[in-house]
């Protein structure tokens, strides 16, 4: 079991740069596992597995950093066991000799790998190492899961490279659902051989002892494919697995006070249309330069129509599954549409990416010009009350302008892998704010995406409805005392004070 953990340990996680977890903003003081609300349903455990260099650690990091899911990492456990004073040092030295010890008193992984490779009976040597390390890693993982169940975490994850190889029935070992991380063999080999300590012989030895990827995918409950050209597809698959293992709370915590506020952006902190118009103008201005053949093929009028109909154009070049995986991410859909056009017209697809970057940057910069005149004053009042503040948007505006300093975190559907009204964006916002979701208030203009999505996630909600056109009463009957409506952003502080949702500091 430990071959991959020994040979490949010295490298870092290996997916493409597109697939790194998102950094959402400032680091608030953490409250440890208390951020995970206690679950009356018991702790659900997600097992993460996959072949070498397929992206397991990166998936685990996304769960941990974006959603706050506690993850037991088998590789990290081995690292600790081999470190100075680690429980694995003495038995490994006894089995393989003092030559595998490092200067710091721990196990030198390079020396251990060399000793294994030099063994006359390699299978017996690896079996001896497994017999030492596997029980120690298992005990560490069981202690992690015991704490999860004792403290009633709603969800925990375990990253086990050789899960199916060592667990014929994962459910008998306390794992509820299994997520397999996968990529095609050529991409796996390319990534693995980029590692500084990897060689063809080492990779062959690792692959020989790992389950065939086709079989691993067949046995898993969920699959995340990390060889997509766009990170959003992989994040979407990961979010689907997390949603299955971490459902919304069955009952809200009505006693919790508001400690953090997340804001929708479009038609909440600024009007939607003017920044979009600025983005269109910028994209059309640069289009002849970046995609000259595409522009010449379409002409100005058809180019504008293509720009506006990007969703349909993206679906025309994507298969149904790929389109569904990208549906939450506006930028990814635009990129797919323009890449398809570039390839059909003879332009470089990288230039299509550059054009999408132009329009996203223009849209983001334009938002500051149209910011609600009361926004900064309202945000300052909420901050003075000690509240964490952030953006939670289904759009693609990047952190920019005056809001960049006024908000503590900034999350998009692309970052999360799911769009509102899914409960996952609200869980991610709560984690970014370092508060439990029961202490989160979300403000937005959509009854379904913002209000009902937040309420189903266990948060509170405020509907911004300047025209008083939306009937909130049916929602209030389903979630009494957990949502309210305001006519203007400037009304928010007084509304929170009147609802009694804040502590004595008020606003």
Image: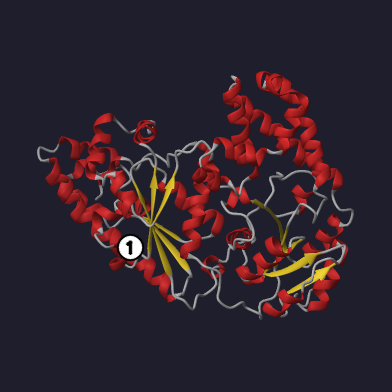
Scheme of image coloration:
secondary structure
Front in this rendered view, residue 60 or 311: 311
Q: Secondary structure at mark 1?
A: helix
Q: Quadrant of the C terminus?
A: bottom right
- Whether residue 20 appears in this view of the structure is no
Q: Is residue 195 above or below residue 235?
A: above
Residue at 43% of width from left, 71% of height from top? 43
Q: Is residue 124 above or below residue 457?
A: above
Q: Would residue 309 be visible to someone looking at this image?
A: yes
- Left or right, 165 with reference to 20: left
Q: Which residue is mark 1?
A: 140
* Residue 42, position as x, y percentages in the image: 44, 75
**Crowd class of label 1 (few under 14; some 14 to 19; many from 20; radius 10 Å):** some
Please indicate whether residue 75 sits to the left or right of residue 406 in the image.
Answer: left
User: Which residue occupies 77% across, 53% down?
Assistant: 406
Residue drawn 58% across the image and 30% down it = 340
């Amino acid at each position: 079991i430990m071959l991959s953990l020994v040979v490949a340990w010295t490298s870092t996680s290996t997916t493409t740069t597109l697939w790194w977890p998102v950094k959402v903003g400032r680091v608030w003081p953490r409250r440890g596992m208390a951020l995970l609300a206690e679950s009356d349903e018991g702790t659900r455990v997600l097992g993460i597995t996959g072949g070498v260099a397929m992206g397991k650690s990166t998936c685990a990091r996304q769960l941990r950093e974006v959603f706050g899911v506690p993850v037991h990492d088998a590789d990290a456990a081995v690292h600790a066991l081999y470190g100075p004073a680690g429980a694995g040092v003495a038995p490994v030295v006894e089995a393989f000799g003092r030559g595998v010890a490092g200067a710091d008193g721990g196990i030198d992984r390079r020396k251990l790998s060399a000793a294994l490779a030099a063994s006359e009976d390699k299978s017996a040597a690896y079996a001896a190492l497994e017999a030492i390390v596997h029980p120690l890693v298992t005990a560490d993982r069981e202690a992690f899961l015991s704490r999860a169940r004792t403290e009633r975490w709603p969800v925990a994850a375990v990253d086990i490279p050789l899960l199916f190889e060592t667990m014929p029935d994962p459910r008998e070992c306390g794992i509820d659902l299994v997520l397999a991380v996968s990529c095609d063999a050529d991409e796996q080999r390319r990534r693995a051989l980029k590692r500084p300590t990897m060689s063809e012989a080492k990779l062959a030895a690792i692959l020989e002892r790992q389950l065939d990827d086709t079989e691993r995918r067949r046995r898993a409950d969920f699959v995340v494919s990390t060889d997509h050209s766009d990170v959003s597809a992989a994040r979407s698959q990961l979010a689907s697995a997390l949603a299955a293992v971490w459902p919304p709370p069955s009952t809200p915590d009505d006693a919790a006070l508001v400690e953090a506020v997340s804001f929708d952006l479009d038609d909440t902190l600024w009007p939607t249309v003017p920044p979009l118009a600025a983005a269109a103008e910028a994209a059309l201005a640069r289009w002849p330069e970046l995609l000259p053949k595409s522009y010449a093929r379409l002409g100005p009028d058809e180019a504008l129509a293509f720009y506006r109909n990007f969703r349909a154009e993206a679906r025309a070049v994507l298969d149904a599954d790929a389109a569904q995986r990208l549906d939450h991410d506006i930028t990814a859909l635009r990129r797919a549409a323009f890449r398809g056009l570039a390839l059909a017209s003879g332009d470089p697809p990288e230039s299509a990416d550059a054009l999408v970057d132009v329009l996203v940057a223009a849209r983001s910069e334009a938002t500051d010009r149209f910011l609600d005149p009361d926004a900064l004053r309202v945000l300052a009042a909420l901050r003075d009350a000690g509240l964490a503040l952030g953006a939670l948007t289904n759009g693609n505006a990047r952190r920019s302008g005056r809001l960049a300093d006024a908000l503590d975190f900034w999350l998009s559907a692309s970052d999360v892998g799911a769009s509102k009204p899914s409960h996952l964006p609200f869980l991610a916002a709560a984690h970014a704010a370092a508060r439990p979701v029961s202490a989160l208030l979300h403000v937005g203009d959509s009854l379904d995406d913002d209000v009902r999505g937040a309420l189903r996630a266990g948060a509170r909600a405020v509907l911004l409805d300047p025209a008083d056109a939306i009937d909130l009463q049916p929602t209030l009957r389903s979630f009494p005392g957990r949502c309210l409506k305001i006519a203007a952003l400037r009304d928010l502080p007084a509304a929170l004070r009147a609802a009694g949702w804040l502590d004595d500091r008020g606003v």
